[in-house]
Image (cartoon, helix red, strand yellow):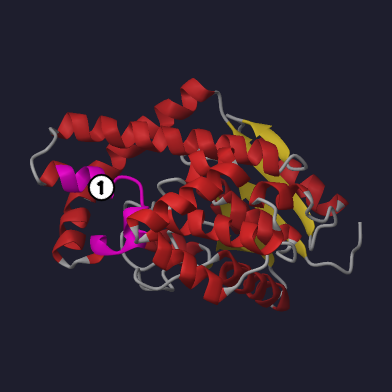
Amino acid sequence: MNRQKPLLAVIMGPTASGKSSLALQLAADFDGEIISADSMQIYKGLDIGTAKPSRREMEQVRHHLVDIYDIDEKLDVYRFVKLAGDAVSEIHSRGKLPILAGGTGFYIRSLLYGLDLLPGDEKLRAELDAKYDSPEGYKQLQKIMRKCDPEDFRRWEKHRRKLIRALEVFTLTGKSITELQTMQQSDLNYRVISWNLCWDRTELRRRIEKRTAKMLRAGWIEEAAAAIKAGILESPTAHQVLGYREIKEYLEGTWSFETTQQRIVTRTWQYARRQITWFKNQHPETEVIHMPVQYSELREKFAFELNSI
């Protein structure tokens, strides 16, 4: 292992797997600071729905990349990599340990391995974006995407920015994002301790159910109502945040509270399953931690790996 490279601890896993809690404990015990690898926590507002750290937790341990952009500002993976990389350097400059924690797998992989093989072209992206808004143009984009990568098409069909990004990369390289990611360099940009928190699927769904109920009790509906009144949910970015669409429909009288809660759980569970697949396929080098595990055991393991790397 090249000790000239900066050290970075990474805690990844699906939603509700306990990433944030573990990262917080490790940061407190090992003089660390947390860098959020959550594509939604970086935006201001929508605190409950994006499961942001509490004010107390933010005071206990310094967090980076939380609440720094307005919801209508665009953030892409390139900007995330720059921001996160700068945060790693800044944390190291103060003699502390950076701990990257989150569930946005593409962001994590891009920070660790780099983005050299994923080119971009803003002019092309704008052209594809304009086509997306045309019924005929959208059909053409669908046809191209189905041909270049059927799996990615199924995954991203309803995600405008991701679909356009995939088409942009394919147009520039003749290869899908999935193909390019398998070609990514094997040499990490950091000396890494990397853990993937893995739960039995039945238990993970129970955790999602429990967390959803807790978030609703904490005022999630009121937060969503205020966001609707302020026009925040009109943003394409806000539409991607799990739960707000369901709560909006509840407030409009479409669903009962119980049905709304179950719909949020179902959608969150579907997202968690996609995350599980991503981490398994795109981060095979990461050590899988089969949860639950007592924190004392994880702390001892982390200390050993920290001293060995």
Residue for point 67% across, 47% down: 178
Label 1 sits on what residue type? Answer: Arg
Task: State the predominant SS element of the stretch in magenta.
Answer: helix
Quadrant of the rendering where the N terminus is positioned:
bottom right
Expressed as whole percent of the image width and height from the top left, the position of residue 198 reads 60, 32
Question: Which quadrant would residue 280 be assigned to in this image?
Answer: top right
Rendering quarter of residue 192? bottom right
Does residue 210 show up?
no
Question: What's the residue at 57%, 55% (across, down)?
Answer: 166
In the image, residue 241 lies at what x, y percent? 36, 52
- In the image, residue 246 lies in the stretch drawn in magenta: yes
Mark 1 residue element: helix
* Highlighted magenta segment, given as a residue range: 233-249
Q: Residue furthest left?
A: 253
Q: Position of residue 256 (x, y in %)?
A: 12, 32
Q: Is residue 56 left or right of residue 93?
A: left
The image shows residue 244, relative to residue 274, as above or below, that is below
x then y, percent, for residue 11: 63, 48
Residue labelled with disc 1: 245
